[in-house]
Structures are given as structure tokens and as C-alpha cells.
Image (cartoon, helix red, strand yellow):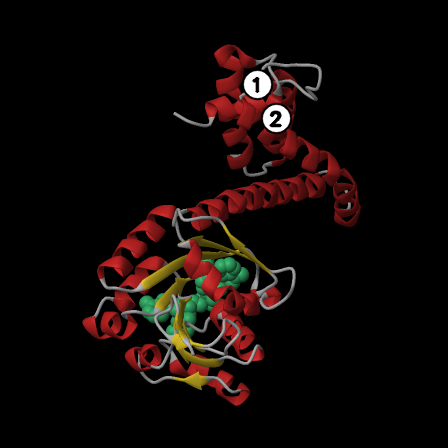
Amino acid sequence: MGRRTLNGRCRRNSHMKRRITVIGTGRMGAALALAFLARGHAVTVWNRTVSKAKPLEAQGVRVASSLDDAIAGADIVVGNVSDYATTTALLAPSAMTEALRGKLFVQLATGTPRHAKDAAAWARAHGILYLDGAIMATPNFIGQSGCTILYSGEKELFDANAPVFAALGGNAVYLGVDIGHANALDAAILTVLWGSLFGTWHAAAICEAEGFPLDAFASTLGATLPVLEGAMKDSVERIAKRRFAADETTMSSVETCHASVRLIHAIGQEHGIHLGLSEALEVIFARASDGGRGTHDMAAVYQGMKG
Ligand code: NAP
């Protein structure tokens, strides 16, 4: 006998192939559709610009001509247009909410925790099962073992559909029932990514201004990354334990780090490098130094990050 499942369909086991609709076939949506297809699922897509989705047909994907038709034939619907506002607008008509009723909708567009909470409330109001996800990879990683995708929402809903999510990558991570957590962790990790990349771009500008070869910069940068990784881990541990005073394991004080920021700023001024990054660092370091935390562990800078 089949049994009733958490995406509103009757099936015999969790490995059964599903009918999956992907809304949005941009760079990421097309990769998601093909990854589901590669695992033997029946895949339908809908895209605003139909011509962009058409090439997927040759690979065995059905391209629906209307969104309600795409949703009607699905067991699971995955959203991957640009953002939540676009998704909300597309799914607002009653034809869409009726077609989605009782089905699982997985939102994989990038958004904030607030976006996820609002989307979950909308789904609840229309009898739609909802999971929120965040893709921590570029399209070329989709379907590979190293691809991490974060999910938030009801655990039973995630567990029941985990074999389906496995198609998208080997590292499907369930974060818990708080629907905002996938987007919260996504934003947190993106902040680290942007901080590192902005630092890299500013660093390249310093090297070029001083005539230092960029290939040598890249190789030396690689050699120093373990130091950065150690400082990141130590900082997060200190923040979690509120251990900001300098102690026997302190690697550097606020004032020592602040001095190096002033030097970076001075080099930028000399060479006409954009000062946005060093000015932002200066403001944050000044809060710690002026707040009497100059001799504290460098992680004490965190105390000025809020309020
Ligand atoms: P993309 O290539 O620019 O594709 C955007 C998609 O959204 C297209 O399908 C586009 O349809 C659709 N769209 C935009 N505005 C629309 C509207 N008003 N009505 C209907 N459809 C609309 O972007 P992407 O890289 O695939 O990203 C999609 C989502 O995945 C984003 O939330 C992004 O943050 C997230 N993501 C992307 C990556 C990545 O590396 N690319 C990584 C992680 C997460 P048309 O084809 O008709 O324009």
C-alpha cells in the first residue's frame, strides 16, 4: 500500500521519481532543472521568456506555456526567479495558489529571513507546504557532491523529500524549524565572502599601485590563508563566549590591528585608491579604540558592530 506523504501525494517509498516543476530557468534555475532530470525525475519548467527555456526541451525537460499549467502537473514546485518579490507577484493569482494547494513549494531564490517568514505565512494561508532554501554554490556545482544547499522549515517535510533534494547536491543541510535560518546563514556567509572579495580587490589595487606582480600576490595570499582561517575561528569562538579581554591566547590587540588599518588607508590616499573600504574599517576600529577597548583582543571590535 502507498502512504500519504508530506507533499500531499500518495507514494510507495521515498525514492520514487517525482514530477518537479522549476519556476525560472536563469543560470541557476536551468542547472536545478537539469540536475533533477539527471536523477530521473520528470521535470517541467516555466520561464517568463519562453525562448530562454526552449533549449532545455532537447534534453528532456517539458517547457510549460503557462505558469498554472506548469504547477498543475507537479508534485513539487521549486522557485528560482531573481527574488522573493518576483515570486510573490507570480504566485499571487488564485489560479496559482489553487494549483499549489497541498503541494510542496521550495523557495530557492536568495532572500532575507523576513522574506522567508512572509513567504511561509503566505503558504500557510493558502494550504501550501513550504520549505525555504539557500543555495551556497554557483550553477556549475549543482548536482555535485560538494554542493551545499541550506533548508529551513518543518523537519518532517525536509526528511520526506531529502532524497529529492539529494539530486541538487551531496550536501543538503537541514537547519531547523525556524524558517528564516537558511537565509540568515546564507547572508552571514555571503558577508564573509564579500568582505574577503572586497579585501582582495583593494589588495590588488595596492599591489598594482606599487608595481608588485599580481601572480606573486595570488600565491603569497594562498600561503597566508591558514592564518586568516585561524583568526576567523578564534574570533567566532570569542564572540560566542563573550571573551573579549586580552588573554594568554590573544594573537593581536585592537590597537595593533587599528594601526595596520591606518597604514592601508594612508597607502590608498597616496595612490588614489577608492577609500570606501578603509574608511569603513576605520569607523568600526575607532569605535573600539575610543570605547576604551584598544588593549583588548581584536575580537572586541565586534562589540561595536551593533547599536
Ligand atoms: P538569472 O540568470 O539572472 O535568472 C533570473 C531568472 O529570474 C530568470 O529566469 C528570469 O526570467 C527570472 N525573472 C526575473 N525577473 C522576472 C519577472 N519580473 N518575472 C518573471 N521572471 C523573472 O539569475 P540566477 O543566477 O539564475 O539567480 C536566480 C536566483 O538564484 C537568485 O535569487 C540568485 O540570488 C540565486 N542564486 C544564484 C546563484 C548563482 O551563482 N547564479 C547562486 C546562489 C543563489 P527571464 O529569463 O524571463 O529574464
Give the mark toward the camera: 1 or 2: 1
Does the residue tagged 1 have its C-beta within 8 Å of any atom of ligand 1? no
Q: Which residue is mark 2?
A: 261
Check contact, mark 1 vs mark 2: CB within 8 A: no
Q: Which residue is mark 1?
A: 244
Tell me the kind of residue under disc 1.
Phe
Q: Is residue 230 above or below residue 180?
A: above
Place of residue 119 in the rendered image (x, y in percent of width and height, measured from the top left): 31, 56
Q: Quadrant of residue 131?
A: bottom left
Residue 265 visible here: no
Q: Position of residue 133 (x, y in %)?
A: 45, 57
Confirm whether residue 230 shows in the render. Answer: yes
Closest to the observer, 54 or 36: 36
| Residue shown at the point (52%, 25%) measured from the top left | 302
Q: Quadrant of ligand 1?
A: bottom left
Looking at the rendering, which quadrant does residue 261 occupy?
A: top right
Q: Circle 2 sits in a helix, a strand or a loop, which is it? A: helix
- The alpha-carbon separation of the residues under discs 1 and 2 comes to 20 Å
Q: Residue at x 78, y 50 (%)?
A: 215
Above or below for 136 versus 223: below
Residue 220 vertical placement versus 307 (above, below): below
Identify the residue at image location x=22%, y=59%: 125
Report crowding for label 1: few under 14, some 14 to 19, many 20 or more residues within 10 A (C-alpha).
Answer: many
Amino acid tagged 2: Val
Label 2 near ligand 1 (CB < 8 Å)? no
Query: How far from the left and from the top, in percent, is residue 193?
Result: 57, 46
Using the image as rendered, state which of residue 86 and residue 271 is in the foreground.
86
